[in-house]
Amino acid sequence: MTRSSHPIPLALTSLALLAASTAVAAQSITRTPWQMHEGQSVILLDAELPANGALPENGYIAFQRAQIPAEGHGWVPAPNPESIGFGGPRASKIAQAGGTCRRAIDYTYFQTIVDILEGTQVDVFKIAFQGMDDASRITIFNRANPGGTVVDGS
């Protein structure tokens, strides 16, 4: 996956974030409000995805067509900028597009930018999820990974 290059120290594309560190380090860490992008249109598939299509044993097939949107156009505040708060009847457009579960893909993207001051020691950095529907994948962008790197097990 590619993403436009930008000078931010760290960006996370995911569905939730919890950054924990020592009290001193917490003062050196800031985060922007969550943003959301509805991504490309629903993708109708010729074949059915396996029930666990987001797992390594199936080659993460459910994510093969994901294209993280570039910065700028289409990014809007998440329903809850502190915790994302996405869900309910508007969460999926698969049925409206004529698709069915496991025969269509509807990606929604979330991002927050975390700034960690140079020299700050982070003891714990967690990404936590609750109330997930289907699957998620976390990609981190930073100076060492300007094109993004997927977090194992996400």
Image (cartoon, grey):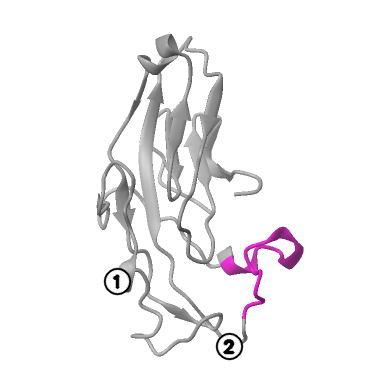
Report the side of 153 relative to 85 (left or right): right
Circle nearer the viewer, 1 or 2: 1
Quarter of the image for residue 63 reads bottom right
| Residue type beneath disc 2 | Asp
Q: Is residue 68 above or below residue 99?
A: above
Q: Residue, x 52% and y 66% (percent of image)?
A: 134
Residue 127's place in the image compared with 123, above or below, is below
Q: Count neighbours of disc 1 (C-alpha within 10 A) and say few if under 14, some if 14 to 19, many if 20 or more.
A: few
The magenta span reads 49-62
Residue at image mark 1: 90
**Nearer-the-camera pick, 140 or 33:** 33
Count of marks overlaid on the render: 2
Which mark identifies residue 4?
Answer: none
| Quadrant in the picture for residue 50 | bottom right
Would you say 61 lies left or right of 66 here? Answer: right
Q: Secondary structure at mark 2?
A: loop
What mark, if any, has residue 46 been given in the picture?
2
Instruction: Say which label, 1 or 2, has the lower sequence index.
Output: 2
Q: Residue at x 45, y 87 (%)?
A: 99
Magenta stretch encompasses residue 53 = yes
- Amino acid at the residue labelled 1: Arg
Which residue is at a point 39% across and 56% down the rendered structure image?
A: 109
Using the numbered discs, state the Cα–Cα distance from disc 1 to disc 2 in whole angstroms: 24 Å
Task: Return the x and y of residue 75 as percentages of the image width and height.
Answer: 27, 53
Residue 66 percent location from the top left of the image: 50, 63
